[in-house]
Image: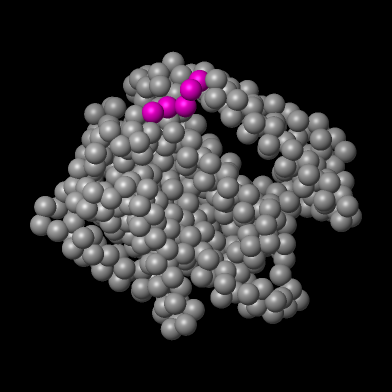
Amino acid sequence: MSGTVKDPTAADLGDERLVQQKGFADAIRASWRRIRGGDLGSVPVVVGLVVISVVFYAMEPIFLSSRNLVSITQFAAPVGVIALGVVLVLLLGEIDLSIGSVSGVGAAVMAVLVVHQSQSMVLGLIAGIACGVAIGLLYAFLFVRLGVPSFVFTLAGLMGFEGVLYLVLGKDGTINLPDGNVFVRYMRYEYLPEPIAYLLVVLISAGYVTSRLLASRKRIAAGLSGVWVPGLLIKGGLLLLGLLFATYYLYIDRGWGYLWAFFVLLVMVMNFALVRTAWGRHVFAVGGNEEAARRAGIKVTRIYVSVFVLCSTLAAIGGLLAAAQITSVSQSSGTDDTNLTAIAAAVIGGTSLFGGRGSAWSALLGILVLKSIQSGLNIVGVDSSSVRLIVTGGVLLLAVSVDSVARRARASSGRG
């Protein structure tokens, strides 16, 4: 048994592989078995978002105004992209403490090339992303060749790349980006045309149903149970209605920003890679049991290299987006509480610190929770950073506690 790797989606499917769902009752029983077995999925974070919304709305109704919700999505996107990279590292049971500093370095390199050396924004963006790739390769070398723990070399990176940020920016300390630049304009000021937003909502809902149906056909062909089609159609319909209403409500103000749309696109692409490709299955397998994955023939070293590179690259991209959003890069870029927020978002969103369990959607849900808390506290007049950090720490502790309880439940049911 030690030489086999369990399908990483098995935990999500639970006992469905033992039962052919034929109706609503079977679907409910299968869902209940998953929950009792510790497969909570996104339920805790969704419930948390609802509770946060109700509490802050009761204190100040403006919290759920269209304008405030649009602002939450816009400010959530850059750190959310960084959190997406953290999700990948956590899936392997590793950590990256330097993501904030890496994001700052990528943004600083871009700003120096564009402003001080009068290079094109395209070249600046490529150079900033290349910094993330190079740092990821360095981390992979330290991990797979020298055996340095990820906690150690990323802690060193946290301090070292903050120094690089100061060095790149030079004596000025702050570089203002050209406000009329296309990249800055679209990431800061522009929003999707309303008809395009509605079209994308329909395509997303249709894509969800289609992908689930195709996956079900493959399971049935393999002799496993498929999804209950009426139930899937109901889910797809509810998703469509929810997204249509959200789009209508947000377009009372400005609507879906290009910045937020880009973040959601990245999440969808990464989710597809994790659940629909061999690479994604191997990431879960290595995070669940590295030795078993190695014996099963998975090239573990390549998985580690790819994940460290992706994490640092996404950190650099997040830094570039943050720079465009505030139209400047300074010595504080990525160095305030970016690390805390990105890591907390990944964990609060449902990614396990123990490796092998999580989803790309964890980054999106987690950062929405944190930015909602921050926005709510500001609206009700509690703008103290100390209170915000205390609340964030409490939510993080709660999320880890839920994960630990769920992990014990899975272990006791034989699916840990």
Q: Is residue 8 left or right of residue 156?
A: right
> Where are the magenta residues, as a range?
190-194
Screen quadrant of the C terminus: bottom right
Residue at x 35% of width, y 56% of height: 128
The picture places residue 132, in percent across and down from the top left corner, at 39, 61
- Residue 109 visible in the picture: yes
Residue most extreme to the left: 171
Give above or below for 16 relative to 309: above
Residue at x 68% of width, y 36% of height: 207
Residue at x 39% of width, y 67% of height: 134
Q: Is residue 21 magenta?
A: no
Among the 4 quarters of the image, the one containing residue 291? bottom right
The picture places residue 63, in percent across and down from the top left corner, at 37, 24
Residue most extreme to the top: 252
The picture places residue 237, in percent across and down from the top left corner, at 69, 26
The picture places residue 91, in percent across and down from the top left corner, at 54, 61
